[in-house]
Amino acid sequence: DGTLEEDQKRRDFTINAMALDLRPESFALLLDPFKGREDLKKGIIRTPLDPNITYSDDPLRMIRAIRFATQLGFQITPASLKAIENNKDRIRIVSRERIVDELQKIMAADQPSVGLTLLHNTGLLEYILPELTALRGIEEIEGQRHKDNFWHTLEVVDNICRATDKLWLRWAALLHDIGKAPTKRFDAKIGWTFHGHEFVGSKMVYSLFKRLRLPLNEHMKYVQKLVRLSSRPVSLSDDHVTDSAVRRLIFDAGNDVEDLMTLCEADITTKNPKKQKRYLRNFAAVRKKIKEVEERDRIRNFQPPVTGEQIMKAFNLKPSREIGKIKDAIKEGILEGEIPNDPEAAHRFMIQKGLELGLTPSGEATKSKKGG
């Protein structure tokens, strides 16, 4: 029973409240009662009605306003921003699925920090990602300070967006430091520490994904993995790093090792040009080491060169702990560089480890060993 004008009044923004007349006598006439075309030209996000009314009708519009500003590079009017701040607590009534849909579009933008900053400044981020806002602030004790990990994180996200459009890699950048808030400690001898923040952060990813109803599938596991490994490549940039350390990183990261390196490079936010150049040079050296070790040892997507069935046959065993111990010993032997990653060497190593465990190899296994 309503009118077109009433419908237009209930639209979210003036740029979305324009219509074209379809009547023959006035076909294609622009019906723009709220000057949406002018706002479109000026790059302004404004609500047709009082913004408090518009946002109260559907609180998701607060995030939509921020999403449009992020995607289009538009400015939200001061009155509208103030209304978002005033109505922020009403976001509680919006379903997580609708919120995440807008958040994903912010994360897919060229510069997500624009939207994340607006979410933070209006108070919405506290309701959506409290793990992130917990990183905000700098503390100083005995003249020692730590960086503001919230603003650092936003820089990392923008950095990674210049290198990749992979959405879940961007999420890994957003969450890579969330473990720092619960692990922050001050040590009088060494200053501020965040011991184990990568492990704690990777565990927090699950509860965050579950709360937001993000997919609890391979995407979550991928983000967890990158958060957990996010500091590992830093230790490999030393000139004296061992091949075994590189092999272990490749083993743990698998096909995601390149994404992990991209994340680590994006994590460089120093404003000192010399330091930035040195860090990038170090990571380039790590990439080179990874390539050399992988080409030689084929550790990525590691598959044991000796199977459990082969171990059972070699020692006439039924399923037992010894099989797992031998398989682990072979894996460790390859990662440590004690044996090459090939079946013959692994078979000989299997026999050796079995004997150490007091097992008796079958005649066929011994022949295979001698033949090798």
Image (spheres, rainbow, N blue to C red):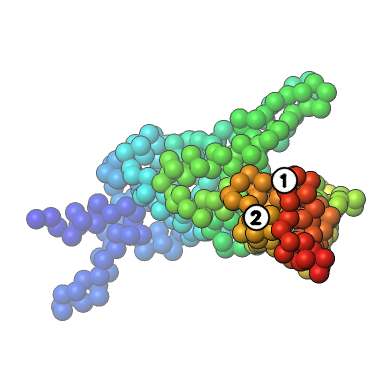
**Residue 103 can be seen in this image:** no
Quarter that holds the C terminus: bottom right
Q: Residues within 10 Å of mark 1 (few under 14, many from 20)?
A: some
Quarter location, residue 311: bottom right
State left or right for residue 300 relative to residue 78.
right
Which tag is nearer the camera, tag 2 or tag 1? Answer: 2
| Residue for point 58% across, 49% down | 319
State left or right for residue 149 relative to residue 45.
right
Q: Is residue 90 above or below residue 320?
A: above
Three-letter residue code for mark 2: Asn
The disc, 2 or 1, on the residue closer to the chain's N-terminal end is: 1
Q: Nearer the viewer, residue 220 or 164?
A: 220
| Residue for point 73% across, 51% down | 360
Three-letter residue code for mark 1: Ser
| Residue for point 33% across, 44% down | 95
x%, y% of residue 189?
A: 83, 23
Label 2: which secondary element: loop
Q: Is residue 288 above or below residue 272?
A: below
Residue with the mark numbered 2: 316
Quarter that holds the N terminus: bottom left
Q: Is residue 345 above or below residue 98?
A: below
Q: Nearer the viewer, residue 301 or 66?
A: 301
x%, y% of residue 313?
A: 65, 59
Q: Nearer the viewer, residue 188 or 256?
A: 256
Residue with the mark numbered 1: 231
**Residue 101 can be seen in this image:** yes
Label 1: which secondary element: loop
